[in-house]
Image: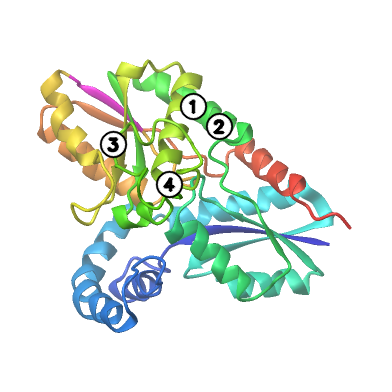
Amino acid sequence: MTGALLINLGTPTAPEPGPVAKYLREFLMDPLVIDIPYLFRWFLVNVLIIPRRSKASADLYKKIWGGRGSPLLYFSQDLTLRVQEILGPSFAVELAMRYGEPSIPHAIERLKKKGATKFVVLPLYPQYSLAATESSIAKVSEFTQEARFIPPFYSQEAYLDAVEQVSKGPLAAAQADRVLFSFHGLPEPHIKKTDFSGGAHCTFDEKCCAAILEANQSCYRAQCFATADSLAKRLGIPKEKYHICFQSRLNEKWIKPYTDTFYRELPKQGVKRLAVLCPSFVADCLETLEEVAIRGQDEFRRHGGDEVTLIPSLNADEVWAQAVSGFFRNHQPRT
């Protein structure tokens, strides 16, 4: 039997300071997330960040927490159940979170108990990054050497088809003057580390990310640009009507352009209605439901805009469940 493991980034178990602090600690102490010596990282996370952010973050989670709990978790659970139904008894399918629960080691143990001897792993991040993709690969590899990893799928037709089908109805209904493709941000040093030219290619402008080349083939920012351009063509959005941007920044050393600047600047250009797609997230979560649909809406209206429409993520839509099942079938180890 083949074990199929889906991995998403993670979520606290409750929208309270304690569980949020536990989640943030596990996340931020990962050296692939904050790449500084351990003692400095420990001090930064446990003394400077967590005491200041735990309650504030918990308050944000409360705004999106529903009867089923964390949207990221229950959308991922729904997807996992549907993928199991589609793949049938030759696969055992489990969900894990890189940080928090259900944990990667527990999910692998459940797959083994179901009889899995080989594993196919899908990190649910369309674009490659050290902090998400590579960290998930490293964690799985601590507990099994029998895993095959499905690579980032930002350019795969099945993924692009799924986003197109899920987005086109809500996008048409939004009647937006302009569209933002808003991706999660990353620190610039993370991007530099994936520059195969030794840092010569990466200039953090549109030119260096205009095409996927040998030098930037693992560059998160370049893959985001490629994703947005592909989706814009499929959705019939003219070049002058969309912008590619990055949200969730912590400081000015994160990749640009920043999403929040568009909330402030576009109303000055006469833009009243804005649609936002978030193609680095396959499930709606804090960054989409709160940061875009609530905070982004408030910011846009405060500067003269009328409406921000968040286009839903793939979540557990049938077309996405079929695409994920296809990924697993295509990467199933041959016996």
At label 1, the amino acid type is: Ser
Q: Does the magenta stretch mainly form a helix, a strand or a loop?
A: strand
User: Is residue 275 part of the magenta span, yes or no?
Assistant: yes
- Distance between mark 2 and mark 1 Cα atoms: 8 Å
Counting residues from the N terminus, which is met first, the one under dot 2 or under dot 1?
Answer: 2
Indicate the amino acid at tag 4: Tyr
Q: What element carries label 3?
A: loop
Q: What element carries label 4?
A: helix
Residue corresponding to mark 2: 160
Is label 2 in contact with label 1 (beta carbons under 8 Å)?
A: yes
Observer-side mark, 4 or 1, equals 4
Q: Earlier in the sequence, mark 2 or mark 3?
A: 2
On residue 230, the disc is: 1
Residue 301 within the magenta-colored segment of the rendering: no
Q: Is residue 42 visible?
A: yes
- Select label 2 or label 3 by which is in front: 3
Rendered view: 306 above or below 99: above
Asked if the residue at tag 3 contacts the one at tag 2, i.e. Cβ–Cβ closer than 8 Å, the answer is: no
**Is tag 3's residue or tag 1's residue first in the polypeptide sequence?**
3
Q: How crowded is mark 2: few (under 14 residues within 10 Å), some or many (20 or more)?
A: many
Amino acid under disc 3 = Asp
Q: Name the residue under label 4.
A: 220
Residue 221, percent from left and from top: 39, 43
Measuring from the top left, give residue 304's x and y in whole percent.
11, 27
Residue that label 3 marks: 205
Residue sitting at the far right: 335
Q: Which sits earlier in the primary sequence, circle 4 or circle 3?
A: 3
Indicate left or right for 33 with 296 as reference. right
Q: Is residue 211 above or below residue 183?
A: above
Q: Nearer the viewer, mark 2 or mark 1?
A: 1
